[in-house]
Amino acid sequence: MSDFTRFIDGYLQAHPEVQASQRQGWRIFWERPASMRELELAHADSVPEPPYHYD
């Protein structure tokens, strides 16, 4: 086990609020409820990409 791994493991054991904060941040940015209206608008606004970008 590396020194860095031991340091991080010890730090996270001493500061459990860090992991709680990380989980909260994850929920804010990644676990948002999907709005069908927003998805429809995003799909309608998208421009189809060509299969090969350099033509």
Image: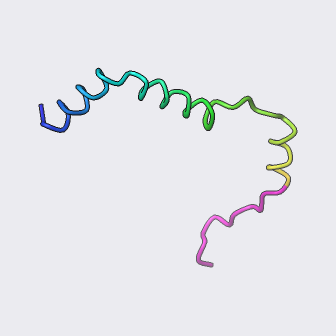
In the rendered structure, does residue 27 fall within the stretch colored magenta? no
Magenta stretch in the rendered image: 45-55
Q: Is residue 4 left or right of residue 18?
A: left
- Residue at image point 60% right, 29% down: 27
For residue 24, what is the image quadrant? Answer: top right
Q: Nearer the viewer, residue 46 or 12?
A: 12
The image shows residue 14, relative to residue 37, as above or below, that is above
**Residue 44 drawn at (x, y percent):** 85, 52
Q: Nearer the viewer, residue 18 or 4?
A: 18
For residue 9, what is the image quadrant? Answer: top left
Q: Is residue 18 left or right of residue 41?
A: left
In the rendered structure, does residue 49 fall within the stretch colored magenta? yes
**Residue 23 drawn at (x, y percent):** 51, 27
- Residue at image point 69% right, 63% down: 49
Q: Is residue 37 left or right of residue 21?
A: right
- Give the dominant element type of the magenta stretch: helix, strand or loop: loop
Quarter of the picture holding the N terminus: top left
**Residue 4 drawn at (x, y percent):** 18, 38
Quarter of the picture holding the C terminus: bottom right
